Amino acid sequence: MNIPHIHSLFLKSTGVSTDTRKIQKQSIFVAIKGDRFDANTFAAEALEKGASYVIIDNEAYYIDDRTILVKNSLTALQELANFHRNYLKLPIIALTGSNGKTTTKELINVVLSKKYKTKATIGNLNNHIGVPLTLLSFDTNTEIGIVEMGANHKKEIEFLCEIAQPDYGYITNFGKAHLEGFGGVEGVIEGKSEMYQYLFKNEKLAFINLEDPIQVEKSKILKHYSFGVNKENANVTISEIKANPFVEILFDSIRIKTHLIGLYNANNVNAALTIGQFFKVENEAIKSALESYIPENNRSQLLTKASNEIILDAYNANPSSMLVAITNFLQLEKENKIMILGDMFELGSSTHQEHTALVDLLKNETNIQCYFVGKAFYECQIQKNNFHFYENFDSFSAIINKQRFENSTLLIKGSRGMALERTLDYIK
């Protein structure tokens, strides 16, 4: 496999694609095998749709000199991305964590783009395929690259760091996410900390949140640049934070009012502010960037429907993110509050324990109507007048369709697989 040769072809192309439904003219199609399909079978279709070359790893699908046969297409994509990263030699910021990765990445991007030509991971393309595609989206005009890294088992962050070779790294937090794959919370800490190990080994810099004791402990061996709330030893000090419901922070006598809901988003804002400071973005530009950012894709969105205010946070959920969302909701100075909570996935043997813990958390809340949706919540139900349990979304929607919410504030949160944003269709 001649990666330099493939890279020379890539530089003349319009980019790389792994999906024939998104083929661009003069692009390169990489045929990657999936669990249910063999993308080699789509090589001819990719050429017909305008691809200049196709990279395959099954010689039975060789077509002509536009076909590049490699031992493994996925490995070729990853090695090409790493080669391109070293060809560009641009500074790269990588971030991972249990919660808030995508929001933080978007905030960092809008802040740094006030001064630099930046490119960042699109959506949440943050795995062993998404990270290479992100790196290959950078070009000679890119001044700073921002790469989100996701993981659901150990050694994955280590592998992604070896591909992207970040100069800077940030871990949003260490929470109860993907417990099944990591083997528990300690496994999560170990897995996410693989980024710190890479930064330490290569003498690179970490951004550290001094509010997080795990990060404080890890930072002792790292070159780092820190932030904290009223922390004298922080490089960047935030003097005030509040959220009712939108996050506001006070920094260097500048008040920043965001469109992000909940205190749990404050660290995401503070991280972007800190990274902006490190890269010498002017304070007023940082303020403008953070205040103009509006979340979408079901992430902490505040919506209005009829007389109701709705906090839609249905993109994903795990015990840590669910806890902070509920805690923040309980603190809101609102009347007629309603919670609609969906199952959390990928918790393995901790599934029942973690869902029961959330139900127990709300046992003493008598003035909030709580709707629990999904099999896991249904199996830990208790009898309370304001608690309502439904085994699946169909049984829930049949009931909710008959309800009439007025002048209420609703929190809708659950794992992506629950697709709780469908609830909006039933709120009249």
Image: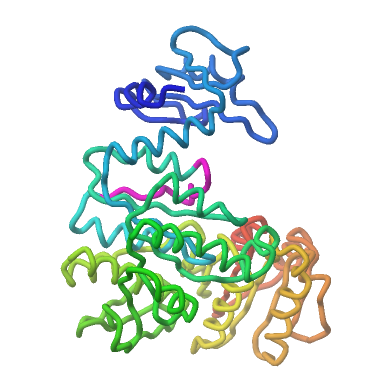
The answer to whether residue 366 is above or below residue 337 is below
Q: Is residue 183 magenta?
A: no
Q: Residue at x 40, y 17 (%)?
A: 52
Q: Position of residue 372 (x, y in %)?
A: 72, 72
| Lateral position of residue 350 relative to residue 115, left or right | right
Q: How many marks?
A: 0
Q: Residue at x 72, y 62 (%)?
A: 397
The magenta region covers: 118-129
The answer to whether residue 236 is above or below residue 420 is below
Q: Nearer the viewer, residue 296 or 47?
A: 47
Q: Position of residue 367 (x, y in %)?
A: 65, 90
Q: Is residue 121 magenta?
A: yes
Q: What's the image's color scheme? A: rainbow
Q: The C terminus lies in which quarter of the figure?
A: bottom right
Task: Give the main secondary structure of the magenta stretch.
Answer: loop
Task: Tell me the quarter of the picture where residue 227 sits.
Answer: bottom left
| Lateral position of residue 319 relative to residue 88, left or right | right
Q: Position of residue 243 (x, y in %)?
A: 41, 82
